Image: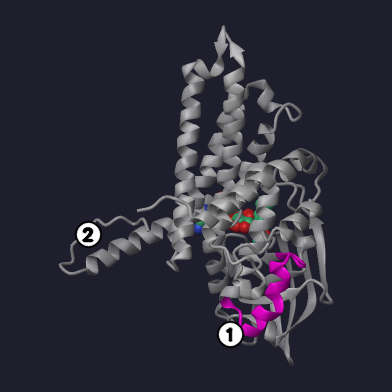
Amino acid sequence: MDFGLSEEQRRIRERAAEFADREVAPNAARLDREDRVPFETLEKLAEMGFVGLCVPEEYGGAGADFVSYCLMLEELSRADAGVGVTLAVHTSAGTMPILEYGTEEQKARWVPDLAAGRKIGCFALTEPTTGSDAAAIRTKAERVEGGYRITGHKQWITNGRIAGTAIVFARAEGGNTEGPTAFIVSTDADGVSFGKHAKKMGVISATTDDLLLDDVFVPEEDLLGEEGKGLKVALGTLDPGRIGIAAQATGIAEAAFRYATAYAAERETFGKPIAEHQAIAFKLAEMQTKIKAARLLTLKAAWAKDKGMRVTEAGARAKLFASRTANEVAYDALQTLGGYGYMKDESPVERYYRDARVTEIYEGTSEIQKLVVSRGILREYEESLEAPGGVPQGRSVVG
Ligand SMILES: Cc1cc2nc3c(=O)[nH]c(=O)nc-3n(C[C@H](O)[C@H](O)[C@H](O)COP(=O)(O)OP(=O)(O)OC[C@H]3O[C@@H](n4cnc5c(N)ncnc54)[C@H](O)[C@@H]3O)c2cc1C
């Protein structure tokens, strides 16, 4: 067992941390206030190779592993969780499904622009009437000569109005209707427009918009995977995507913890720093312990992804724990600051508290993560009954 990072992983983390502190953190409060996407930051991240960090070099990416990608996401999210999720959705939800499920022709045509940041990607599954229940989407893809015509309303799409391409899920009519079908859609196509821009509680520097599709022609060659098998694409995309959100949540928690620690060491009440009151000292101890556990779950899941292992449960566990940790740590950090924590202009902790909240909602709510994990537990149990002797093995489900 080796918990050390490779030379390259350490180098990527250091570059990300340095950039996050120098370029991202100083702008975070202003972007949060102004509800603005930091295009200049995204351009610089593209120049650094961070926009296509874990995309193979043959498709224009930096060819780093998934562990490195998670280390980068944690560092950027520590500075601005909106920048973190912009990159997370662009990479794991907007680019990786093409690498995972696309044909060679699709990879060559779409991925290099995404890897270089010339185009931003988004992932359009959710609709006004359905989120968790992905199979219940209503967007239609009518079969026509040479392709499909898609009509529907996608809601709360991260990167929506800044995206050049969208992975769109629709119900194919007249063909295989057993489940949704995935398509790669250019946002330049006739009939694509952006509706409402969501006014959110947190991660405000990431734009979240409705994507409207009105009789959009999508050629046959832009079908992603097989008709009727889009749920496989969606769930297969979300498995590693959740590891990225776990990294984002860990970054938010780390930021809140660091701020609270510095504050507790300096602020005095009753003749000593509040960090020397046991109630505050114990909060810091709990915060740090939970963050380290969240990071381990996250990096272990990322490592498993790099090894080509199935990460459905590992990703769900990492996201479940890291997102809860982000919320608990932000809560305790705010409490550590007292009234100063509650004020918008006195510290960033109020923003961390708001940013943490959504990590329990997007890319599958915490309830959905528990469904995934509990199904895995039962499957393991049943498999252990089928093992020689038919006795439950009591094996660990971790891994
Ligand atoms: C800021 C933001 C950005 C987003 N970005 C994107 C994006 O880029 N692309 C995209 O497609 N979507 C995106 N979403 C949508 C997000 O993925 C959904 O909000 C999420 O999946 C939950 O769906 P819902 O909001 O419809 O809640 P619902 O599915 O209606 O669930 C409501 C509540 O019921 C619970 N629940 C539902 N089913 C079960 C069950 N079987 N068992 C137990 N509890 C259950 C849920 O956990 C939740 O608490 C985004 C959302 C937000 C807030």
Q: Nearer the viewer, residue 185 or 210?
A: 185
Looking at the image, the residue that sits furthest to the front is: 7
> Where residue 27 sits in the image (x, y, percent)?
77, 41
Q: Residue at x 62, y 17 (%)?
A: 267
Give the image quarter of residue 114: bottom right
Foreground: disc 2 or disc 1 = 2
- Observer able to see residue 385: yes
For residue 104: magenta? Answer: yes
> Where residue 141 sits in the image (x, y, percent)?
70, 80
What is the three-letter code of the residue carrying label 2?
Gln
Q: How many marks?
A: 2
Disc 2 packing (10 Å; few <14; some 14–19; many ≥20): some
For residue 354: magenta? Answer: no
Where 208 sits versus 33, above or below?
A: below
Magenta segment boundaries in residue numbering: 101-121
Q: Main secondary structure of the magenta part?
A: helix
Residue on which disc 1 sits: 176
What is the three-letter code of the residue carrying label 1?
Asn
Q: Residue at x 66, y 84 (%)?
A: 105
Q: Is 204 left or right of 56, judged from the image as shown?
A: right
Q: Nearer the viewer, residue 6 or 313?
A: 6
Disc 1 packing (10 Å; few <14; some 14–19; many ≥20): some
Residue on which disc 2 sits: 393
Where 242 sits versus 236, above or below?
A: above
SS assignment at label 1: loop
SS assignment at label 2: loop
